[in-house]
Image: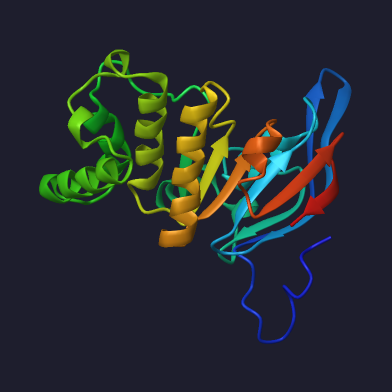
Amino acid sequence: MPEAGADEPGAAPPLIQIRGLSKDYHRGEQVIHVLREIELDVRSGEFVALMGPSGSGKSTLLNLIAGIDKPSGGTIRIGGVDIGTLGEGALADWRAANVGFIFQFYNLMPVLTAFENVELPLLLTSMSAREREAQVDAVLGMVALTDRADHYPNELSGGQQQRVAVARALVTDPTLIVADEPTGDLDRVTGEEVLSLLEQFVRELGKTVVMVTHDPKAAAKAQRIVHLEKGVLVDMVA
């Protein structure tokens, strides 16, 4: 069910509005129903965790919210834009302007320094080299990696690499940050540091974070937990 009060007169609309969302994949003549009739609202500035067993559809839902994939049915509106109706070019532009990505295995370019990895998304913008440098320096400072800016990924610990990935997700000042198992490859202490950064971005910068995790301790950092089972939303816990 959508969040109570979200559609009340005078209430600000949720940043993310999902209605009747379904996603099917075809394997030969077989149709695999991954998501079925999902209804979900996420407010601006909210930190939401998606949980569920393997194969429940949580990563598929995250990819649909991020505009990486398109729904088979239903709608996803983000900031009032029905992203399922956008063409590939428009969708790519929308992602670049609105979404920051954090992955489990960092996805850093090994031949680029930490600074250069963080700068990559800005190369698609009209920012000058000086503006890019200032922006990258600012977000590296936020994740406490200013002194590692000229280091390559193989010269960084796993936790430092993930903080570079977090900085890269933040550097374009996106509305929405999506994180797919961001602590899954980290030890407990380092994972806590990454989760604290996400909490900080929500609390201090007003970012909206949607995170997939299998770890109940990581999910507990979120303001709300959404549970999926067999492609169906079964529970939402505040």
Q: Residue at x 56, y 64 (%)?
A: 44
Q: Percent x, y for residue 206? A: 46, 62
How is the model colour-coded? rainbow
- Examine the rendering and report whether any part of residue 212 can be seen: no
Where does the C terminus fall, quadrant-wise? bottom right
Q: Which residue appears farthest toward the front when viewing the image? A: 189
Q: Residue at x 72, y 86 (%)?
A: 9
Q: Quadrant of residue 112?
A: top left
Q: Which residue appears farthest toward the bottom when viewing the image? A: 10
Q: Is residue 107 left or right of residue 39?
A: left
Q: Nearer the viewer, residue 51 or 129?
A: 51
Q: Is residue 117 above or below residue 64?
A: above
Q: Is residue 126 left or right of residue 16?
A: left
Q: Which residue appears farthest toward the left when viewing the image? A: 130
Q: Percent x, y for residue 164? A: 34, 32
Q: Residue at x 49, y 22 (%)?
A: 105
Where does the N terminus fall, quadrant-wise? bottom right
Q: Quadrant of residue 145?
A: top left
Q: Percent x, y for residue 135? A: 23, 49
Q: Percent x, y for residue 165? A: 39, 33
Q: Residue at x 60, y 42 (%)?
A: 211
- Examine the rendering and report whether any part of residue 177 can be seen: yes
